[in-house]
Image: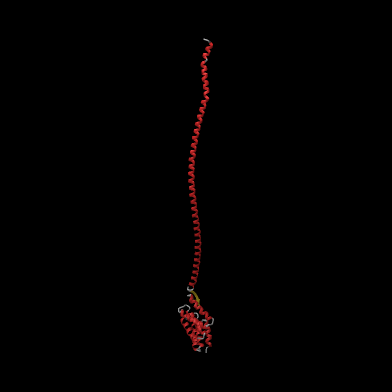
Amino acid sequence: MNPARHTRVASLPWRAALATCALLAASLPARAGLFDDEEARKAIVDLRARVSAGEEENKARLAELTATKTQLTAQLDQLRRTLLDMNGQLDALRTELAKMRGNDEQRAKELADLQRLQKDLAQGLDERLRKFEPTKVSLDGREFVVDPAEKKAFDEAIATLRTGDFDKAVAALGAFQRRHPDSPYADAARFWLGNAQYGKRDYKDAIATFRAFVSAAPEHPRAPEALLALANSQAELKDPRSAKRTLEELLKAYPQSEAALAGKERLASIK
């Protein structure tokens, strides 16, 4: 066999292989391009799916936020209404408190006025009661208790006697005896009545009054004076005998008295 031919025949398989390789090499970029487009499509689909899922999630979150906002708005409105109601109640309480304070101040004023009135009434009552309360009196060495009205009547009668108005004094002392027959002033009233009668020169009445005084109260400190005044009244009536007997009675009954000393001189002068 021709070597050259043999060489040509032997090289055919390699040429076919090379051709196949060339074809394969030529087809590789096309297949690679097909793979890239598919992956891109998958990536786009996946991205769209994720975007859609994100949008759905965002919508859900937005709906949730909207619901939460609505709930919060309702709660806020309720809170505002509650605050307004509480403010109204607070204003009402303040008004009521102010009213109560005003009432308390008025009541305090009324109470103060009432207490002041009560005090005034009590003082007035005490003063009126004092006019009726028994009063302790010391007179002619004796102490006793009398009503204020009784004391006032006696003091006024004695004050009239001291002015020298004997007529009024006789009337006042006589009225006192009639109004207060059992008074502790009875003896003193009788003694000063005799002096008033003597002062108005009503000697007969004076004699009767002095004699009644001595008979009723022989132990009275003014009994010696009454006997001396009695003797003087008898002498004024030109009855020296009776006057002497009265003076002798004075000297015998009350020898140590000042009236007895004056009676001795008076007895010596009577004829």
Number of labels in the image equals 0
Rendering coords of residue 103 (x, y %): 49, 61
Rendering coords of residue 4 (x, y %): 54, 11
Extreme residue toward the top, this view = 1
In terms of depth relative to the viewer, which is nearer, 199 or 212? 199
Color encoding of the figure:
secondary structure
Rendering coords of residue 52 (x, y %): 49, 36
> In the image, is residue 93 above or below residue 134?
above
Rendering coords of residue 125 (x, y %): 48, 70
In terms of depth relative to the viewer, which is nearer, 194 or 158? 158
In terms of depth relative to the viewer, which is nearer, 39 or 190? 39
> In the image, is residue 197 above or below residue 76?
below
In terms of depth relative to the viewer, which is nearer, 121 or 87? 87
> In the image, is residue 84 above or below residue 15?
below
